[in-house]
Amino acid sequence: MRILLAEDEKELNRIVCERLREEQYSVDACLNGEEALAFLQVMEYDVVILDIMMPIVDGLEVLQTLRADGKQVPVLMLTAKDSIQDRVKGLDAGADDYLVKPFAFDELLARIRVLLRKPSNQHTGFYQVDDLVLYPNTHKVLRADKEIHLSAKEFSLLRYMMQNTGIVLSREKLEQHIWNYDYSGESNVIDVYIRYLRKKIDEGHSHKLLHTIRGVGYVLKVDV
């Protein structure tokens, strides 16, 4: 099992790394959020441990970027402050658990074991971007726990975009994938369906998920 630890307190970072390795975990460690994002771009992890207060990029920003990219790896947040507001911020951003410093190492291990037992989205059969959730097997879509009713084409379009979260998709690519014919450059079918989809998933929400990149295409992502 591979764990990423992002903790800016050097001594705590060193001790936790040593103890985790003694428990036979593979550990990559870093001291700030920028380094954590660099690790996450090139490696897959079973658990990510993030300190909230870190230099350059803080733990919440790392978590938001991680979830915006559609990655559902379990995340444990560390903080020196035991405040309701901090816990709510972390959980709302997509954290799976929360641990207040100082903590007993046995408690950290127990929480890691719980996170490792949780099935990921890949195995539970759903896609999630922020508070938008799509269940491919039942054709059910939720935004902020409210069901959204989509046509078959709208559902296929949204599923494809959620499978490619954070990637700008051209009109040509979308039309070829969803409608299975060559894009002529004259059809506005994609623009029409994007408009339908945007109205259904974004209307009434303060933060938008479906974005137009002028002259290029469309992207589904969380703005952070």
Image: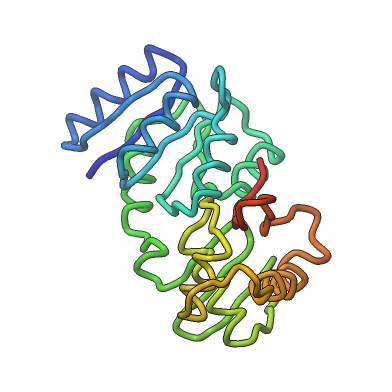
Q: How many marks are shown on the rendered structure?
A: 0
Q: Residue 199 appears in which quarter of the rendering?
A: bottom right
As drawn, 184 above or below 102:
below
Q: Residue at x 65, y 75 (%)?
A: 187
As drawn, 129 above or below 224:
below
Q: Residue 171, percent across and down?
A: 58, 64
As drawn, 126 above or below 106:
below
User: Residue placed farthest to the top in the image?
Assistant: 11
Q: Residue at x 40, y 30 (%)?
A: 38
Q: Residue 47, percent across and down?
A: 35, 44
State the quadrant of the C terminus.
top right
Q: Residue at x 75, y 53 (%)?
A: 207
Q: Residue 8, percent across and down?
A: 46, 18
Q: How are the residues colored?
A: rainbow
User: Residue placed farthest to the right in the image?
Assistant: 204
Q: Residue 121 appears in which quarter of the rendering?
A: bottom left
Name the residue nearer the viewer: 58 or 53: 58
The reply, left or right, for residue 68 in relation to residue 124 is right
Name the residue nearer the viewer: 133 or 194: 194
State the quadrant of the N terminus.
top left
